[in-house]
Image (cartoon, rainbow, N blue to C red):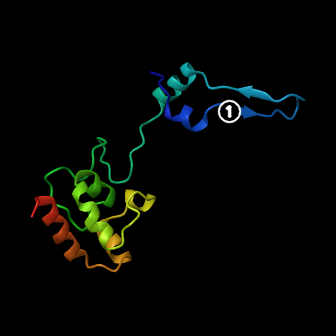
Amino acid sequence: MVSTTFKEAVLGDIEAADASKSAAATATISAAAAADVNATEPSVKLPGMGNNATLGLQMGEPITENSIIREIIEVYPNTIPALQEIGMGCLGCPSATSEPLWQAASIHGFDVNDLVTRLNNLRKGA
């Protein structure tokens, strides 16, 4: 199995033109260089992730108006149809990674307290 780092997948081969030379030079990120760079880079935490890189919402915890949309659908995927029914069709969009439920409900014209109750009933299997 071939292992590809994130940078290799995004950047691939980097081609650079040197204005002082007539020929273009091609620079390739070697696997060793890419591994070294990745080893020294800090991890990037997505919005809503704590210092220990865990989700803010954990299985079994209630959904609140401050719960992040991404966390809700990752921890409780059975809530996706209820969110889509009120117009939240783009649950994978960048806004969902950091948007709290109260903000999404406001944008979509839905009462956040009703939504919290509905999602928690789904979470409990009611």
x and y, in percent, of residue 78 in the image: 22, 57
Provide the residue designation for mark 1: 14
In which quadrant is the C terminus drawn? Answer: bottom left
State the residue in front, 87 or 66. Answer: 87
Extreme-top residue of the structure: 32
Which residue does the image show at 31% across and 44% down from the upper left? Answer: 51
- Depicted 44 relative to depicted 71: above or below: above
x and y, in percent, of residue 19 in the image: 86, 35
Q: Amino acid at mark 1?
A: Ile
The image quadrant that residue 98 belongs to is: bottom left
State the residue in front, 37 or 17. Answer: 17
Viewed as shown, does residue 75 lie left or right of 120? right
Mark 1: few/some/many CA within 10 Å (<14, 14-19, 20+): few
x and y, in percent, of residue 17 in the image: 80, 34
State the residue in front, 10 or 84. Answer: 84
Viewed as shown, does residue 23 lie left or right of 121? right
In which quadrant is the N terminus drawn? Answer: top left
Which residue does the image show at 11% across and 60% down from the upper left? Answer: 125
Extreme-right residue of the structure: 22
Which residue does the image show at 38% across and 76% down from the upper left? Answer: 107
- Depicted 31 relative to depicted 94: above or below: above
**Label 1 secondary element:** strand
The image quadrant that residue 115 belongs to is: bottom left
Viewed as shown, does residue 35 lie left or right of 102? right
